[in-house]
Image (cartoon, rainbow, N blue to C red):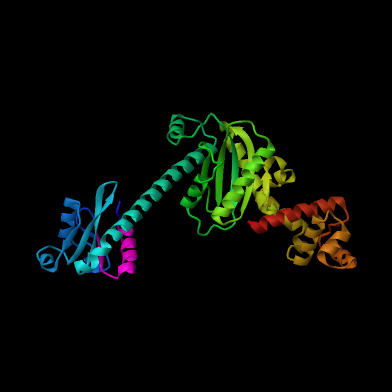
Amino acid sequence: MLFPEIAEKIVKDVKKLIGEDIIIVNTKGIIIASTDEERIGNFHQGALKVIEKKDTLIILEAEAKKMIGVRAGINLPVFFRRDVIGVIGITGDPAKVAPFGEIIRKMTEMIVSENYYAEQLKLQSRSLEAFVFDWLQNREWDSVFLNQAKLLNVELSSKRQAIMLELHQYEHLLLRDIYSTFSRWNHAKKGDILIRWGNNRILLLREIYNQENREQILSFVTSFQHFLEENLHSQLSIGIGQIVVAKDMKQSYNQAERALRSSIKLSSIVFDEDLTIEMILDDVKKDTKLIFIERTIGPIKKESELIHTLKILFQNNHSLKNTASALHVHINTLHYRLKKVHELTNLDPANIHDLLILYLSLQLLDEKTKN
């Protein structure tokens, strides 16, 4: 419980508060952390007496000389769940350092307790992540898998829906922040499974009790998005899979992940059922995509002005007037740029076939750039 790395952290924190020498001793009477590094590893007889009596021990200068590894000061037992897990000692004039004793002990116990529950949360979350990983592999539901589901209180008879969220800012995001935030959300259900999925993604396998329409699902997800963004201080992109039975969870997961990729591009909540051309592009191999880009817009992919012009053209539904206005250029300048695209790529923006190729190429180029 009172590991050396935790003890070292406590010693440093306490030293900042009172400026006195501090030691932390384990239940065998060995000093495991100290502001005086030469004392680490030494036996402390006074601490062993504290552990035996489970009570504070004040040691005066005269008494310290008669004991092994002891200096004058105050030694206090550190408790966790009513058991003594170590001793914290403050070296110095007992009359001077004693007033700090109880405060420092409470602070130490809080740090130990927080670390313990953080580790328990980490273990539990890892178990749940491993279980979900197996679940999404579409493996057979053998007795081991079913027993694990029971231990983790995962209901496999319910219908579920995969929702994938990606945080835009996540450098300082802690696992406990995610879970404590989710636990405070009023609409969270007992059967919902929420896990961290990589560095910046959260996967929610939402349990569905009653039949829900699209508006209800969107209302739920929008509310969830606003709550998380406010509490985690990060914008979110969200992809939503379809409602499936537990056996088909991988299908909903794949849909949510595919929808999320489109959501990142569009900066909105995306339902997989709304995807059309994105479904086709998602199934194309990476090497094929790269070759397609080179064969089509390869000659202009570094011509930022031409690429930007084409993007604005598509955003304005091929309206030359609106495109020129959006670009703040004369219509003749726009014609010149489109002509240059035609000359360099041999793809004519005025031809519907070539226009489709240009559109697909830009979609793949955007995807490549973001990856």
Find residue 100 and report its image quarter: bottom left
Q: Quadrant of the C terminus?
A: bottom right
Q: Is residue 43 visible?
A: no
Which residues are the magenta region? 4-25
Magenta stretch: includes residue 13: yes
Find residue 218 and report its image quarter: top right
Find residue 13 and report its image quarter: bottom left
Measuring 62% from the left and 46% from the top, which residue is drawn there?
223
Which of these two is toward me, 141 or 228? Answer: 228
Measuring 86% from the left and 65% from the top, which residue is drawn there?
334
Measuring 27% from the left and 59% from the top, which residue is drawn there?
102
Q: Is residue 219 above or below residue 287?
A: above
Question: For the view shown, which residue lies furthest in the right direction?
Answer: 332
| 188 relative position to 7: left or right | right
| 138 relative position to 15: left or right | right
Residue 91 position, x and y percent, is: 22, 67
| 347 relative position to 187: left or right | right
Which of these two is toward me, 354 or 53? Answer: 53
Residue 172 position, x and y percent, is: 50, 59
Q: Main secondary structure of the magenta part?
A: helix
Residue 87 position, x and y percent, is: 23, 57
